[in-house]
């Protein structure tokens, strides 16, 4: 009875134009307020293109991406795949995303045939309440909007977020107090999953969806210690992912995010996607540009 995830039916649906040339066939669905293409969408689509250039038995284990130009949501994106190397155990595919005749994004993805090894270890998953005990992002926003003392410009901002059709379910573990500008530790935890049903399918499909999800609210982790400033400009520079264990992107996973460093108008964020059973499924890292107004914000009340 579940509806098919729009991430599969539309957002990550690519049309093959040539053997290794693809075009995004679906609509862009959700576009951030910046009116630039969402970085996670480009990463996910690029991985779809790369995955179509390897055998079904090979699974992606890592990808490394650079955002080189802003994506234009008004025109399609072409994805050009280069079969850089096909080995016995590992294969590498390079992908270039093109708009207006220029690359907006480059990516290398590496795929591996399954291999067993006795060398295994992982960190321990943080102890957090299960998603069933937490409010969704939409429910939290509705709760904030019921506060009669909320300043009008913040009310408008939250109403705008509420109206966005983001194809991800999100449940923050410790949602920040939007009425406070007090610095917080640059860490956040939230349960995430694709909205809709994906089901049992090639693991590469779930990896492409996780690539989309991984970029949402990721860089914002670096802003938590600097909440007194208003953002002028924030954009991703690069994005890397390592896939460790099978998972379902339409099942709840815990996204553990932290920012170990910021400086020089750049910030670094790191993330881990955990399965509910405590298995570390994915590790992520990203650097982005963050520019703020020098004058601190006034109170939101």
Image (cartoon, rainbow, N blue to C red):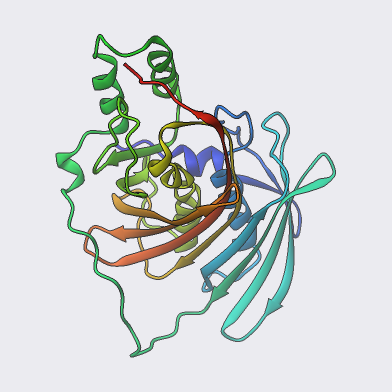
Query: How far from the left and from the top, in percent, is residue 127?
Result: 17, 58
Q: Please tell me which residue is depicted at 55% across the width and 27% down the height of the picture.
A: 33
Q: Nearer the viewer, residue 231 or 94?
A: 231
Query: Height in image: 249 above or below 117?
Result: above
Q: Is residue 268 visible?
A: no
Q: Please tell me which residue is depicted at 37% across the width and 49% down the height of the picture.
A: 186
Query: How far from the left and from the top, in percent, is residue 261?
Result: 47, 57
Which quadrant is home to the C terminus? top left
Q: Quadrant of residue 81?
A: bottom right
Q: Quadrant of residue 298?
A: top left
Query: Height in image: 115 above or below 55?
Result: below
Query: How far from the left and from the top, in percent, is residue 199?
Result: 36, 51
Q: Please tell me which residue is depicted at 24% across the width and 63% down the height of the picture.
A: 125
Which quadrant is home to the N terminus? top left
Query: Height in image: 51 above or below 209?
Result: below
Q: Nearer the viewer, residue 185 or 298?
A: 298
Q: Nearer the viewer, residue 279 or 80?
A: 279
| Side of 175 where 36 appears, left or right | right
Q: Quadrant of residue 178?
A: top left
Q: Single out the residue that lies furthest toward the front.
A: 295
Query: How far from the left and from the top, in percent, is residue 12?
Result: 56, 45
Q: Single out the residue that lies furthest toward the bottom.
A: 118
């Amino acid at each position: 009875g579940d509806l098919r995830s729009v991430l599969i039916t539309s957002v990550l649906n690519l049309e093959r134009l040539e053997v290794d040339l693809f075009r995004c066939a679906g609509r862009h669905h959700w576009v951030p307020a910046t009116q630039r293409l969402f970085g996670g969408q480009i990463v996910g689509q690029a991985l779809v293109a790369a995955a179509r250039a390897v055998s079904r038995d090979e699974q992606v284990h890592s990808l490394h991406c650079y955002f080189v130009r802003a994506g234009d949501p008004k025109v399609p994106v072409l994805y050009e795949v280069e079969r850089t190397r096909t080995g016995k155990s590992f294969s590498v595919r390079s992908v270039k995303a093109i708009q207006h005749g220029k690359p907006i994004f480059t990516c290398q993805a590496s795929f591996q045939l399954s291999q067993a090894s006795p060398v295994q270890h992982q960190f321990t998953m943080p102890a957090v309440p299960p998603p069933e005990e937490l409010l969704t992002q939409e429910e939290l926003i509705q709760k904030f909007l019921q506060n009669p003392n909320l300043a009008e410009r913040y009310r408008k901002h939250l109403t705008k977020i509420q109206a966005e059709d983001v194809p991800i379910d999100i449940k923050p573990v410790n949602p920040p107090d939007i009425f406070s500008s007090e610095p917080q530790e640059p860490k956040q935890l939230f349960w995430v999953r694709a909205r809709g049903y994906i089901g049992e399918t090639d693991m590469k499909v779930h990896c492409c969806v996780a690539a989309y999800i991984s970029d949402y609210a990721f860089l914002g982790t670096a802003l938590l210690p600097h909440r007194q400033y208003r953002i002028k400009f924030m954009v991703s520079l690069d994005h890397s992912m390592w896939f460790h264990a099978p998972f379902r992107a339409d099942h709840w996973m815990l996204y553990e995010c932290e920012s170990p460093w910021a400086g020089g108008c750049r910030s670094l964020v790191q993330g881990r996607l955990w399965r509910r059973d405590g298995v570390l499924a994915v590790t992520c890292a990203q650097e982005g540009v963050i520019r703020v107004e020098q004058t601190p914000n006034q109170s939101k009340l």
